[in-house]
Amino acid sequence: MKQYLLGYDLGSSSIKASLIDAATGQSVASAQSPAEEMPMLAVNPGWAEQDPDMWWEHAVKALQATLKKSGAKADEIVAIGISYQMHGLVCVDKDQKVLRPSIIWCDSRAVDIGRNAFQSLGADYSLKHLLNSPGNFTASKLKWVKENEPKVFERIHKVMLPGDFLAMRLTGDIVTTASGLSEGMFWDYETGAPSQQLLSLYGIPADMLATVVPTFSIHGRVNKAMATQLGLKEGTPVSYRAGDQPNNAFSLNVLNAGETAATAGTSGVIYSVTDKNAYDPKSRVNTFIHVNDQKPVKSNGVLLCINGTGILNSWLRKQAQSGGAPYEYDKINAIASEAPIGADGLSILPFGNGAERVLEDKNVDASFHGLNFNRHGQAHVFRAAQEGIVFALKYGFDVLQGMGLKTNVIRAGQANMFLSPLFREAFVNTIGAPLELLDTDGAKGAALGAGVGAGVYASFEEAFKGLRIIRTQEPDTKLTEPYKASYAQWMSHLQKAI
């Protein structure tokens, strides 16, 4: 009988499911739902919410589509892993009913709450114990609910991250991981437990947090109701979960100090692994517990996030329509390549998707600079957008380097903006490091993680036996100087904006 591993990737745009042949580690089929993008609710400027029940609906559809593509049977799935959009807040009552829409990662409403908490706790405590300012993370979002929706807060039985919610639906168990609590800013790195000081300051009962289990372990088993609904075998373990960026790094076999992963979807991330409790004094980048952290070997991931990445490219695509239909991304990439490096003086700041952590939680919005109606056309705009995204990543990458984190090579999945030849060229020549593109993605990584957690694989090495590099791209000495000059021009506009 065949054995398959199921991986979910719960994003803010869609839910993807991937089925992996456990024997080979190779993808059998994958599907996402919806075909386009899930809506975000923005009741007020800077807000971003989604309905967790919508996530579940699309998780079911993605699984059904994946099974149909593969011809596999649901009861041949032996373990389930979950990757999910980080920093979201899900609140449920004692009956596991959702009490309000999830406040997701790019929502900016709790910035001032986190800033005030940093002052109240003190920089010394925050940076040594939390490795970050409390900032606009899950804990601060929960404090916002307490202050602004007290009746909802009173009914909360447990708070969860998005992946915890998906696992709860499958198993009926409410658990989380230390890595997950660290991304929510609940974790004290000195005590190795949830931060009692932060919980006390925010007035959050400790028992409102989910029970902590190891990242690679049995988190729960598919219950009878879900087995009946989905065709899964009752008792199938959910045996791995991680936020999308730690999971992306895991998917790319980025597990050791000095290794770096990148992604460029709706948001863009560079994630470097370290064996130290490293922090940025200004909290412009954030340290979280990595998936393979296990005493006595420390493993943390330092994450740079640019909210306005692929969402800028997506926005431009929707504006540039032909015959009433948006351009294909391949067409945008081809048009962009017609413009020279630097887009003939046009620069775009891509910060139009909420407060940017790397800009010290400022919300500067997106903006065009140097636009000349007589010189610039579509090609310049498309190129300036892709370069602007790369330059924003470079700005944050320099913060990582300033913390002493070294990068010899950056690994990424061949997906999203890394599919663009222009983006790859700008990336390697601006960042100054080689790029390896691998045949993997978040859902596949989650499936392999489930295999480790359920004991299907005895080691990480066994899990990654099928991982392969598709493309390697090195910086070109002829291009580094032009990109350096273009970046300097872009930086001059950023300095004025902030």
Image (tube, rainbow, N blue to C red):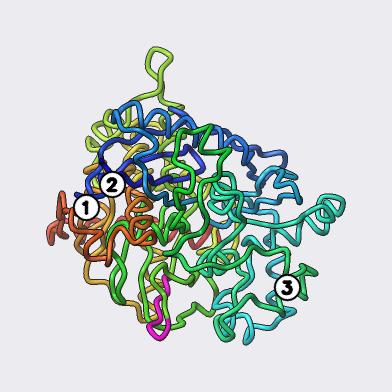
Q: Is residue 149 above or below residue 116?
A: above
Mark 3 vs 2, N-terminal side = 3
Viewport quadrant of the C terminus: bottom right
Quote the CA–CA distance across marks 1 and 2.
Answer: 8 Å
Q: Which residue is mark 2?
A: 418
Q: Is residue 375 above or below residue 216?
A: above
The amino acid pointed to by label 3 is Leu
Mark 1 vs 2, N-terminal side = 2
The image shows residue 156 at horizontal and vertical percentages of 77, 54
Q: Are marks 1 and 2 in contact (CB under 8 Å)?
A: yes
Q: Nearer the viewer, residue 263 or 330?
A: 263
The amino acid pointed to by label 1 is Leu
Q: Residue furthest right?
A: 151
Depth-wise, is mark 1 or mark 2 nearer the camera? 1
Depth-wise, is mark 3 or mark 2 nearer the camera? 3
Q: Quadrant of residue 322?
A: top left
Q: Which residue is mark 1?
A: 437
Q: Is residue 459 above or below residue 309?
A: below
Q: Quadrant of residue 455?
A: bottom left
Q: Nearer the viewer, residue 483 or 328?
A: 328
Q: Which residue is mark 3?
A: 199
Q: Residue at x 66, y 77 (%)?
A: 195
Instruction: Give the structural element (helix, strand or loop) at label 3.
Output: helix
The amino acid pointed to by label 2 is Phe
